[in-house]
Amino acid sequence: MLKLIYVNPTTGSDSNSGSQQAPLKTISQALQQAASGTKIQLLEGNYNPTNGELFPLIVPFGVTIIGNETNKGSGIVINGSGKYISRIFGSQNITFVLSNGSRLEGLTVTNSATRGTAVWIESSSPTIKNCTFINSQREGIFVAGDANPVIKDNIFTQNSASGISITKNSQGEVRGNSCFQTGFGIAISDSATTKIINNHIYENRSGIVVSGDARPFLRENVCERNVQDGLTVVANALPDIGNNRSSGNNIFRDNGQFDIQNASINKLISLDNQVESLKVNGNIQFFADPEPEPIPEPIPEPIPEPKYIKFTDINGHWAFDFIRELIELEIVAGFPNRTFKPDATITRAQYAALLVKAFNPQSLREPIVFEDVKQNFWAYQVIQQAYQGLFLFGYPNKKFLPNQNIPRIEVLFSLVRGLGLTNQVEIDLNIYYADSSEIPNYAQNEVAIATLNGLIVNYPQINKFRPNQPATRAEVAVMIYQILVLAGKVWEIDSPFIVKN
């Protein structure tokens, strides 16, 4: 049973049990008691240093802090700041630091400190939804490293620098948010490739600002009534605001200077966006919806298409060749809507099913009863088979966490252990991976074995292992294909993203 901790800053006490009848007083104390799967329910009130909060509040793996999602956190106000040392950006003034799998839902968060940021996300994959970020002295949310967050249905207003700042190699999704009367609505820089979808960005200094080498994906956003530009593009940035496979469907209107200003070195392609031609500046090429292709004459005896053709979202993908071969081998499959979703994450249950399909592991130990995997659960049998075959392990208290996204390090560890590649090797992982310090001690030897055997795929940067980032369906497919190469069952596919010894 998941643990639920109640916190009430007015009537609670940190010597209480944390039950609904005897709530704690501070989030700080609740976090000390929390483990993965814990939900911390905040009641109305002010959570600040005066009431005993210690900032920054670091939310551990798998912990959720909930306020009131219906009213976007109104009345549940967290206002405070503390020093946090970022591996990338050094000392920062932060309210919340979010770890992998953590969640903030239905809170109001403010950081009034000089250059204060409400939420810091660095190389982790949390979820933030239905919150309000207001009056912070820098950003509402700052995203850094190889982060892959979901930021959904929030309000960002009156923050000094930006509503959301997305930097470095961050991915993730920003969907359904309102950013208004703040500095920049959304600022995207470095090599970020975040999906920015269906946001309303208005009455800011500028709407969306894209810089560095960023390649964000913009769809169905409304950028209007901003003081300067709706969309500003500089340096070597190149946002995708529509391509030959997907219309942009963004609206840029009534902005003070330009609706779109391209000051970058690249030509910006705009497909099916609403924008006034007199309110644009720079090298921009506009296209309307492409005309439908003519229907070909029927062929009396059609030649069967390769199985991968039925998926609409893998052509041109960096892992296309690997996915195609695994589809032909009937090891991987897609979804009913004719998509494969190569960049989607994969749960532990889904991964177990894939392991059984690829390797059909034999039983090497007794079955186990996982408390969170009932016999009527769709993946019960494959989880048992993967466990008995030594590919997968559980968590303390007989938990398996079937619906939790599996991190890249766990995929590599399970493949190496499951295949019995247990010899001790000694290589300097620093030579291969700029982020080798993030590889946990328990998996150092397994990563070394995988490196020497060409099992590791690092996209888009070959020297970034990103051990704690959730694995994508494409990454898992490539790793499994490389195992089949090692076993001599398939041909090797050349790829710039396979780490080679």
Image: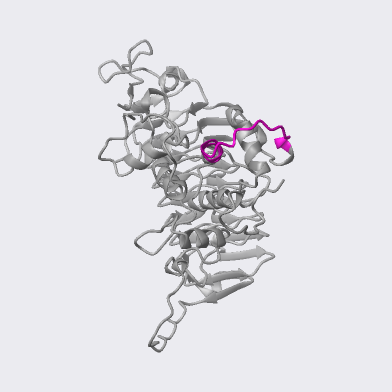
Indicate the position of residue 403 as horizontal and vertical percent values.
Answer: 37, 40
**Do we see residue 499 in this rendering?**
yes
In front: 2, or 103? 2
Displayed quadrant of residue 220:
bottom left
Tell whether position 415 is magenta: yes
Displayed quadrant of residue 66:
top left
**Quarter placement of the C terminus:** top right
Count the numbered circles shown.
Answer: 0
Specify whether 31 is left or right of 315. left
| Extreme-top residue of the structure | 15
Indicate the position of residue 212 as horizontal and vertical percent values.
Answer: 66, 54
The colour scheme is one colour
Indicate the position of residue 341 as horizontal and vertical percent values.
Answer: 45, 57
In front: 290, or 90? 290
Image vertical order of residue 68 relative to residue 497, above or below:
above
Indicate the position of residue 216 as horizontal and vertical percent values.
Answer: 55, 57
In front: 133, or 393? 393
Specify whether 500 is left or right of 284. right
Tell whether position 191 is magenta: no
Image vertical order of residue 97 relative to residue 397, above or below:
below
Specify whether 213 is left or right of 397. right
Tell me the residue at 70%/48% (across/down): 500
The stretch of residues the image draws in magenta is 412-430
**Do we see residue 403 in this rendering?**
no
**Quarter placement of the N terminus:** top left
Tell me the residue at 54%/56% (across/down): 208
